[in-house]
Image (cartoon, rainbow, N blue to C red):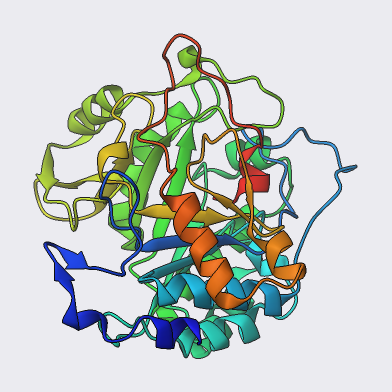
């Protein structure tokens, strides 16, 4: 029996807030968001992520492998797919993969999937329209400064700033918006950019999201003192122009949302260090080598691709996914005594 057939008619067995066969963890959280790293290669060497060395070994699966695993997750109720890396736009065949994903429907509603991408934007300008045509829904661009000098110091890649800016504008122009621009704040590197990013949001019509730096870097240089916390960001923005808090779109939303008193511009603040949001987590991750990560800060990978390559059936793989998700952590422990950094860095986990 196929995975989809084995689900029967999920609308016949409703539970409070969901359906009997929907993927859930042991805390009752419905898992609806899947982040898939399609490569751990990257054309940047950002100071908060990479060592700056080029001798890394990379791991990627054939697209058919990603697609089979994504289909299994969708059969269990995944509604949102985010393609990440590394830098996902480096992957050959990415447009074809998006086209295949865009054909999928969740069995619980029959609706299509929300398909998003997180990119550094370096290659985005020329690919925005093809990505839209393939079925991509939304775009998030990682951009950690709005002046070229600071941007280059962080990315360690010269002459890229204008390309990223062009990519953001192209994504908005073809309908891959509202474009979100993610900025990881590091004290002493780019915390001077907060007010400039507020102005950028207002001028460019994008949603700027500030992210507290998390201990996910290769160099293991993270310290609590380098984190710019939510309260400081809010105070700085309020001094620039009065903020108005916006309601969350959903309980599982990671960002606290704000606009300004005149309604122009939108700012999100993702504060996993100072204001953890684990209690409503709806996310699961697939690494570029096909391993399930139940949390960014997991100490363990779960080798779904390995089982697939050894000949496991769809039903066996689905049962394994359910077992893994039932062991999803209640929360991370950043800042607590005994906290251990995750077994892999962010570029290998997927953003």
The image quarter containing residue 222 is top right
The residue lying furthest to the top in this view is 337
- Residue farthest right in this picture: 55
The residue drawn where x is 19% and y is 56% is: 250
Instruction: Classify residue 175 as left or right of residue 170.
Output: left
Image height check: is 39 above or below 176?
Answer: above
Q: Residue 22 at what x, y percent from top left?
A: 31, 67
Near-viewer residue (220 or 342): 342
Q: In this view, does 127 lie to the left or right of 5?
A: right
Q: Residue 284 or 312: which is nearer the viewer?
A: 312
> Residue at the location (31% across, 63% down)?
205
Q: Residue 103: x percent and y percent?
A: 47, 90
Rendered view: 9 above or below 182: below
State left or right for residue 130 relative to residue 43. left
Give the quarter of the image for residue 111: bottom left
Using the rendered view, name the quadrant where residue 263 is placed. Answer: bottom left
Can you say whether 41 is above or below 15 in the image?
above
**Residue 182 drawn at (x, y percent):** 44, 48
**Nearer-the-camera pick, 8 or 305:** 8
Residue at left 42%, top 77%? Answer: 75
> In the rendered picture of this protein, how many numbered marks are placed on residues?
0
Question: Image point 50% across, 11% down: which residue?
Answer: 338
Location of residue 260 in the rendering, given as x and y in whole percent from the top left corner: 15, 46
Front residue of 332/211: it is 332
């Amino acid at each position: 029996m196929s995975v989809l057939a084995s689900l029967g008619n999920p609308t016949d067995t409703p539970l409070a807030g969901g359906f009997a066969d929907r993927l859930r963890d042991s805390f009752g959280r419905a898992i609806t968001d899947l982040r898939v790293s399609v490569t751990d290669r990257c054309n940047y060497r950002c100071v908060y992520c990479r060592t700056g060395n080029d001798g890394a070994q990379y791991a990627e699966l054939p697209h058919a492998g990603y697609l089979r695993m994504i289909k299994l997750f969708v059969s269990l109720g995944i509604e949102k797919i985010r393609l990440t890396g590394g830098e996902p736009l480096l992957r050959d065949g990415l447009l074809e993969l998006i086209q295949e994903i865009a054909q999928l429907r969740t069995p619980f509603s029959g609706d299509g999937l929300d398909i998003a991408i997180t990119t550094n934007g370096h290659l985005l300008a020329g690919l925005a329209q093809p990505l839209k045509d393939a079925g991509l829904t939304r775009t998030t661009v990682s951009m950690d400064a709005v002046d070229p000098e600071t941007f280059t110091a962080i990315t360690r890649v010269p002459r890229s700033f204008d390309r990223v800016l062009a990519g953001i504008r192209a994504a908005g122009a073809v309908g891959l918006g509202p474009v979100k621009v993610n900025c990881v704040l590091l004290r002493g590197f780019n915390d001077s950019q907060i007010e400039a990013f507020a102005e950028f949001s207002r001028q460019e019509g994008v949603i700027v999201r500030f992210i507290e730096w998390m201990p996910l870097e290769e160099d293991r240089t993270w310290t609590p003192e380098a984190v710019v916390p939510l309260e400081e960001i809010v105070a700085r923005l309020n001094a620039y122009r009065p903020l108005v808090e916006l309601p969350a779109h959903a309980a599982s939303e990671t960002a606290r949302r704000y606009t300004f008193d005149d309604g122009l511009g939108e700012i999100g603040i993702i504060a996993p260090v100072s204001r953890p949001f684990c209690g409503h987590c709806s996310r699961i991750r697939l690494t570029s080598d096909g391993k399930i990560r139940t949390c960014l800060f997991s100490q363990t990978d779960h080798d779904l691709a390995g089982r697939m390559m050894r000949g496991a059936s769809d039903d066996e793989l689905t049962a394994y996914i359910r077992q893994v998700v039932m062991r999803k952590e209640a929360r991370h422990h950043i800042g607590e005594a005994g906290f251990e950094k995750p077994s892999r860095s962010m570029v290998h986990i997927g953003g």
